[in-house]
C-alpha cells in the first residue's frame, strides 16, 4: 500500500512540469512597456496654434530578448468621443439635397496612429479588431437603424475629411525604435482641438501578436479668460447673455462716438 502510494506521488511529480507548461506557467518572463509623456496637460488660449506631444519609453525584460519575430511598436493618441452624422448629397431635380445618412455613435474628435512599420505587416487583424487600433476601427458602433446597405463610403468620407483637417493621421515609421529597447513618437496637435481627455496607448507586438500594452491620458482644456467665458456660457447662460448684450451696446456707442469725433 505504501509502495503504491509512493509510486503514485512519483508519477504525479514527474507529470507536474508538463502540466504547468501546458497551462503557460513555465514560460519565460515576457516584455513590458515602461513609458512616459513630455506633458500631461495642454492649455487652450486665444493664441493657441497647436502643440506637440512626445511619447517615449523602453522595453523592460526579465530575460534575454526572444529570437525570431521582429519587435514592433504602435502608439495611438485618441481625442474625446462624440456622435456624428455623415450625410450624402445627391442632385435631385437640379437641387442638391441630403438623400441618405449614417450615424456613428462615437467617433474620436482626434485620432493619430504612429508605427514602426506598415500597419498591415506588423499588426494581426484579430488584434486590430480586439484593440481597435487602426483608424477605421477607432469608430464605435453605428447609432440608430441603418438607411444604407454599405456604410463604408460614409465612414471613408468622414475619415478623408478629418484627415484633410489634420484630425486623423497615420504615420508609418513615426515611432523610432532603437536597439529593440528604446522608442519615441512625436505628435503634432492641430489648433482645432476639442477640449477633454486624450487617451494615449502603446502596443508592443511580436509577429503581429500583442505582447504588452500601456495606457495614459492627457488633459486638454481652456485656460484663462477663455475658460471663464466658456464656464459662464454653459453654467450661467442668462448672465452671459446680458454681458454680451451690454458689450454690444457699449461697442455700438463707442463706434458712434468715435465717428462723431472724427467728423
Image: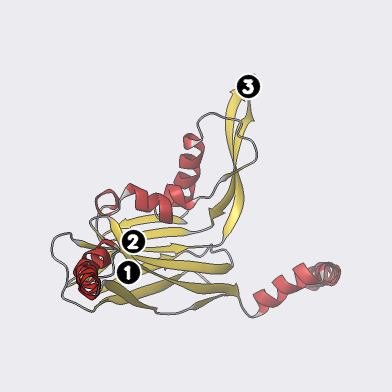
Q: Residues within 10 Å of mark 1 (few under 14, many from 20)?
A: many
Q: Nearer the viewer, residue 181 or 237?
A: 181
What is the spatial separation of the Cα atoms under label 2 and label 1, in whole angstroms? 7 Å
Nearer the observer: mark 1 or 3; the answer is 1
Q: Which residue is at the front of the view, 154 or 126?
A: 126
Of the numbered discs 2 and 3, the one sitting upstream in the chain is 3
Residue 212 shows which numbered tag?
A: none
Q: Which residue shows up at 46% across the image and 46% down it?
A: 159
Name the residue that disc number 1 marks: 185
In terms of depth relative to the viewer, which is nearer, 29 or 138?
A: 29
Q: Residue at x 28, y 48 (%)?
A: 120
**Residue beneath disc 2:** 114
Q: Earlier in the sequence, mark 1 or mark 3?
A: 3
Which residue sits at x=60%, y=34%?
146
What residue sits right under mark 3 in the picture? 92
Q: Position of residue 208 (x, y in %)?
A: 27, 55
Tell me the element at label 2. strand
Amino acid at each position: 500500500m505504501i509502495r503504491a502510494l509512493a509510486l503514485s506521488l512519483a508519477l504525479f511529480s514527474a507529470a507536474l512540469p508538463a502540466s504547468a507548461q501546458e497551462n503557460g506557467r513555465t514560460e519565460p518572463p515576457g516584455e513590458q512597456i515602461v513609458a512616459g509623456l513630455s506633458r500631461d496637460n495642454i492649455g487652450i488660449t486665444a493664441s493657441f496654434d497647436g502643440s506637440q506631444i512626445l511619447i517615449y519609453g523602453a522595453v523592460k525584460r526579465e530575460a534575454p530578448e526572444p529570437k525570431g519575430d521582429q519587435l514592433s511598436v504602435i502608439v495611438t493618441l485618441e481625442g474625446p468621443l462624440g456622435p456624428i452624422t455623415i450625410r450624402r448629397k445627391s442632385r435631385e431635380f437640379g437641387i442638391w439635397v441630403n438623400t441618405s445618412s449614417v450615424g456613428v455613435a462615437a467617433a474620436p474628435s482626434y485620432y493619430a496612429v504612429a508605427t514602426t512599420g506598415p500597419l498591415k505587416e506588423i499588426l494581426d487583424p484579430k488584434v486590430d479588431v480586439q484593440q481597435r487600433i487602426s483608424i477605421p476601427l477607432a469608430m464605435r458602433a453605428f447609432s440608430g437603424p441603418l438607411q444604407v446597405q454599405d456604410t463604408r463610403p460614409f465612414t471613408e468620407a468622414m475619415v478623408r475629411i478629418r484627415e484633410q483637417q489634420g484630425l486623423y493621421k497615420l504615420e508609418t515609421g513615426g515611432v523610432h525604435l532603437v536597439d529593440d529597447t528604446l522608442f519615441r513618437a512625436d505628435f503634432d496637435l492641430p489648433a482645432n482641438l476639442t477640449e477633454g481627455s486624450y487617451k494615449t496607448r502603446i502596443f508592443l507586438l511580436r509577429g503581429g501578436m500583442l505582447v504588452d500594452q500601456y495606457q495614459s491620458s492627457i488633459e486638454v482644456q481652456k485656460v484663462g479668460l477663455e475658460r471663464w467665458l466658456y464656464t459662464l456660457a454653459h453654467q450661467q447662460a442668462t448672465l452671459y447673455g446680458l454681458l454680451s448684450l451690454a458689450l454690444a451696446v457699449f461697442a455700438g456707442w463707442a463706434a458712434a462716438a468715435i465717428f462723431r469725433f472724427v467728423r
